[in-house]
Image: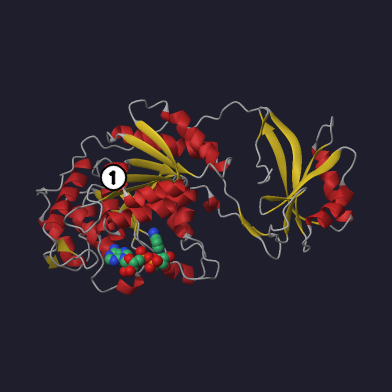
Amino acid sequence: MDYPSELCSANPKHPKMKKITIAKGDGIGPEIMDATLKIILTAGAELEIEEVEVGEKIYLAGNTSGIARESWDIIRRNKIFLKAPITTPQGGGYKSLNVTTRKFLELYANVRPCVSFHPFVQTLHPGMDVVIIRENEEDLYAGIEHQQTDEVVQCLKLISRPGCEKIVRYAFEFARQYRRKKVTCFTKDNIMKQTDGLFHKVFDDIAKEYPEIENEHWIVDIGAAKLADMPELFDVMVMPNLYGDVLSDVAAQIAGSVGLAGSANIGESCAMFEAIHGSAPRRAGQNMANPSGLLQAAIMMLIHIGQNSVAEKVQNGWLKTMEDGIHTYDIYREGTSRRKVGTHEFAMAVIANLGSFPASLQPVSYAGGKPLILPRYTRKEPARKELEGVDLFIHWRGVDPDELAGRIKKIETGQVKLTMITNRGIKVWPDGFEETFCTDHWRCRFKPAEGQIFSHHDIIGLLTRADEESVDTVKTENLYSFDGIPAYSLGQGQ
Ligand code: NAD
């Protein structure tokens, strides 16, 4: 199906005409993009559309990012990007275009509404209406990984104060704008006291600025279990990248189907809108795919660019189509559905319903919807930062921590002492347990001797002596305190 290009390019000088970039992507992408554009343009969206090619073809032509330089220029110029799913070829060092786009364009907030449309779409959770707001740039998705020994690889989990402040504030501003009652934060700060601890602390601090909105924090494991079992307990949710990535798919699926959910990726100057599902290659080209996820993303885009009445008309027409039981194969159920249709027929049914309202599902009103403008992050006064020691990470193939301590003590001086050895975070020296399993990756902690001050020269000295003693140092981590509070993990078991 082709979208009616005369509707979108008739008058590019029209003051309300908004130029956007689209990419039709791979697999089912072109079909669902055509269906989506046809619906929103027929509903009156005033868009001038510029298309770029991204995805499999570009990857396989040798571009490991899946996008050409000229396409970046177009996306950055237009600032609004509606993107269909793409296929990332397996292996071969291909980078995820989604992750790259989010980070390059500073799309820090990923917003995923997960709503059930009971009884028209089967779900165990008829009352579910959750919006997951996921930090979109940091966490393990910084993608900084290293192999350090034969047996151990590492991925850095990076959490920044600006990252936390922006996403948490976004969640509370979102709740305020859409008159939501509660914001829930998920972290694992009982284990990751520095990284998730910072996210939780920032959440608690910012929550105080929104006294009219209830706030709560859950440890992510039990929180996830509750979300899967009783999603009605939750309203707006905010969490670091990895938890949000996993749980927003879970939430979309238990609401009815991943095929129904869209997402917005919002930054200070650019925004990208996409379905949450992938390119479903097995369904490609068969007029089977459900375009609803991308349509939901397009509706969020229309609100973002101020075309709220069009967004409202499309959403109400879509809800009516859901109610009419006109369903694609993925949500079709004997008994509840009335007609199983393909992508094209579904789009035509939504178009026929433009201007209608659902009878039993709640019609939407987007009159008050507008892009959230957040204050720019302002850097705080620096804390008093003091170097308290260093962890040397050592590649050593032995098994006895006492033997390693004997070797490592040779690089001690009168000023700098070995205080602890851990393996995978567990203290194994002094006073370790025989039962503890050890890999070839050891953390040796050095602190100043009683009454001594530690400096960067001590680290250089340690590294030099380690090299002389043929100790294989694979990395160092400096131990700092900030305003007198030690800001590093202790060995578990201490
Ligand atoms: P997928 O989401 O493409 O498919 C999972 C299942 O859901 C399949 O059974 C599929 O048939 C069904 N499905 C998904 N969307 C549907 C729709 N709109 N209508 C009907 N059924 C639908 O996930 P996958 O199979 O793991 O991934 C396929 C490809 O998509 C991979 O190359 C992956 O890298 C890519 N992917 C891309 C994105 C993106 O571009 N945003 C996101 C996730 C996966």
Q: Position of residue 249 (x, y in %)?
A: 37, 56
307 relative to 472 in the view: left or right = left
Q: Residue at x 31, y 45 (%)?
A: 130
Element under disc 1 = helix
Q: Quadrant of residue 382 in the image?
A: top right
Give the camera-side residue of 328 and 449: 449
Q: Quadrant of residue 194 in the image?
A: top right
Which quadrant holds the C terminus? Answer: top right
Q: Residue at x 83, y 57 (%)?
A: 403
Which quadrant holds the N terminus? Answer: bottom left
Residue 219: tell me if it is visible: yes
Q: Position of residue 193 (x, y in %)?
A: 57, 40
Which coloring applies here? secondary structure
Q: Position of residue 133 (x, y in %)?
A: 39, 44
Q: Please name the amino acid that badge 1 sits on.
A: Glu
Q: Position of residue 103 (x, y in %)?
A: 49, 49
Give the camera-side residue of 419 and 474: 419
Q: Residue at x 27, y 63 (%)?
A: 32
- Of all residues, the one furthest to the front in this rendering is 434
Give the camera-side residue of 301 and 492: 492
Residue 279: tell me if it is visible: no
Ligand 1 near label 1 (Cβ, under 8 Å)?
no
Q: Quadrant of residue 195 in the image?
A: top right
Q: Which residue is mark 1?
A: 232
Q: Quadrant of ligand 1?
A: bottom left
Q: How many neighbours does mark 1 have within 10 angstroms: few (below 14), some (14-19), or many (20 or more)? A: some
7 relative to 435 in the view: left or right = left
Q: Residue at x 86, y 54 (%)?
A: 407
